[in-house]
Image (cartoon, rainbow, N blue to C red):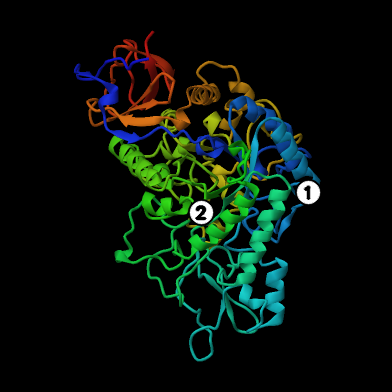
Amino acid sequence: MTTAETTDALGRILAPAAGVRLHRADDDSAWWRHAVIYQIYPRSWADSDGDGVGDLPGITVRLPYLRDLGVDAIWLSPFYTSPQADAGYDVADYRDIDPIFGKLADVDALIEAAHGLCLRVIVDLVPNHSSDEHAWFQSALSTGPGSLERERYVFRDGLGDDGAQPPNNWESVFGGPAWTRVADGQWYLHLFDPKQPDFNWENPEVRAEFESILRYWLDRGVDGFRVDVAHGLIKAEGLPDWDEPLHMLGDADGVDHDHGGKHPPMWDQDGVHEVYREWRRVLNSYNPVDTPGHDPAHDRVLCAEAWVDSPERAARYVRADEMHQAFNFDFLQAPWRASDLLESIEDSLAAGDAVGAPTTWVLSNHDVVRHASRLGLPVGERRPNGIGIGDPQPDAALGLQRARAATTLMLALPGSAYLYQGEELGLPDSTDMPEEARQDPTWERSGHEERGRDGCRVPMPWEGDAPSYGFGPSDRTWLPQPEIYGSLAVDRQRGVAGSTLELYRALLAARRDLRLGSGSLSRIDGYGDDVVALVNAADGRASVQVLVNLGVGAVPVPEGWEVLIASGPATADGQLPTDTAVWLRPAE
C-alpha cells in the first residue's frame, strides 16, 4: 500500500515518508530484538499463602494474565536466598530460593508454566555485590587481611596513622560512607548498603564463579539475565577520591552532570566490557549460532542495567560480542517536551544502529517514580528519590493522561520494550505511605531526607473488593496499598472500553500484528515544535503514523489517515488534544 498524503496542523500538504529516516527496518528474526518484556517484582505481584509477601507460586498462577496482556517474556527481580536488607538485591546464595518466595521446585514449575504459555523467563543477576551473609564474605571476615578469601571483595587499609579513616571519600548511593571498618581494622567497599559488600572483579575466582552461576540457571531453563548495576563492576585503578555526589544509580536524577570533565571512578569503567564478552561466550554456547538448525527463537539473552552518561556510552554494552539489550534510561528521563523526546529517540536509535543493536525502551521500573506520577509533576522537575507526605504532589489526572500517551509513543518505536508491573493499570506511586512503613534502606541511611523507592513497589491490585485488593488471601501486605488502587484493580478494568488495561492490550496486539518492533522509523516534519510525529513502516505491512501532541492547543488528524488506537478521546471536532497520542493508518 502506498503512503497517503497527509494534511499537517498548518494545512500544508506533506508526504510522511519524506521526513528524515531515523532507523531502517530490522529483518533479524531474533526474538529479543523486538520483544516486549514485563517486569515482575516478586514481593509485590501475587501472594499465594497470605503472609503479605508475593511468592513464586503466586506468580505462576497469574501467568495467564500476562499471556492475555500480550507480552513476550517476563523479567523477575531477585528471588534468591537473602536477608532482604535491600529487598533481595543482597544475595546470600545465588543458587537457591529464599523461603519467603518458595523453593527451587517452585521456580522450575514457574519456568515450565511460562514456557507452556509461550512466555520466556529472564531472571535478575546481581554481580556488583553480595550480601554480607554470603559464605564468601563470612570467610573473608574470618581469614583476615591478605587472605585469598578477602581478595574476592574490595578490602583496603584505612588512611591516617591508625588507619581509622576510610580508604577514600566515596559515598554510598543509599547515603553515608561507602566504606565500613571490620574488627581487624581493614575497611570494605559497599557502593550501596553496608550489608552489600562489593565484589573484586579483578579477581579471576569471582569471574569464574559468576560464569558458573550463569550456567546453573541456564541449565534450569531460564532465557536470560537482567544484570543489576552492570556499569559498576570495575572500579578505577587506585580507587581515587571523587568529590561529586554519588547519585541514586549513577546520574538518574535527570540532571546533566558533566563532573568537570571527569569520569566517575566507580561507574562505567572500560574493563566491564571484557566481563560481558566472557559472559556472551557462555551464552553463545547455549545459542549455537554457527550450528545448522540454530533457531533464534530460543536465544538466551543479557540485558544491562547501565546508568551511563549518554546513548553512545549505553551502546557500548550491546556491541555484537557483549550484551543483547541495555535499558534506555535517556528516554525514561527525557522531559515531557517534544524536542526532548525526539532528541532522545533519534540519538538512541543512532547509537544502537552504530553497533547493530536494537534500542530497549523503558518508562518505569522498581527503582524510579512510576511514570503515571512522574509525568504529573511540572515539566523538568525530578523526584528520583521518591515522593512522599509533605512533598509537592503530582497531578494524578494529568500524570495518567501523559503516561498513557508516553506508552503509546514508546510501543510504536522499533526495538524492544520493558513494562513494569501495574503500569498497564495506570498505577501511581504511593505518595501517602506512612513513614513508619518505609523499608527502602535509602530512607534510613539518608537520615529520612530521601523517601526511597517504596512508593513504586506497592503490591498489585487484582480485585477491587477483595482483601488486599486480591493480592493475597489475607489483608496483609508487606507495604500498604493506597486506597486508589482498589478502583484501578484488574477486575475493574478488564473489558472496560477506554481503561488503561485495555489500551495496553490493544497497543500490544497491534504492535505485534503490524511488526512495529522491527519496522523502520522516519520523522514527519511540519506539525510544529510541540508535536512528535513519526511513521513506522514494517516490511509488507501498512505504515503506522504516531502523533503525540505536547502543545497547548488541539492538532487536526491528517486527512487520508484513520485512527487505529488513541491514548485518549478526541476533541468534539475530532482533533488530537493536548497530552494525547494516536496511531494512525492509511484510510481504506
Residue position marked by numbered label 1 in the rendering: 104
Q: Amino acid at mark 1?
A: Leu
Residue position marked by numbered label 2 in the rendering: 322
Q: Residues within 10 Å of mark 2 (few under 14, many from 20)?
A: many
Q: Amino acid at mark 2?
A: Glu
Instruction: Classify mark 1: helix, strand or loop.
Output: helix
**In the rendering, at what x and y percent does residue 136 appear?**
70, 70
Residue located at (76% from left, 43% from top): 108
Q: Is residue 432 visible?
A: yes
Q: Is residue 232 visible?
A: no
Q: Decide: is 325 above or below 507.
A: below
**In the rendering, at what x and y percent does residue 535 appear?**
35, 26
Farthest-out residue, bottom: 161
Instruction: Classify mark 2: helix, strand or loop.
Output: loop
**In the rendering, at what x and y percent does residue 265 appear?**
43, 68
Q: Indicate the quadrant where residue 424 lies.
A: top right
User: Is 248 on the left-hand or right-hand side of 472?
Assistant: left
Looking at the rendered image, the quarter that the N terminus falls into is top left
Q: Decide: is 497 above or below 334.
A: above
Q: Residues within 10 Å of mark 1 (few under 14, many from 20)?
A: some
Whichever of callouts 1 and 2 sits on the residue coming sooner in the sequence is 1
**In front: mark 1 or mark 2?**
2
Q: Decide: is 288 above or below 182.
A: above
Front residue of 309 and 483: 309
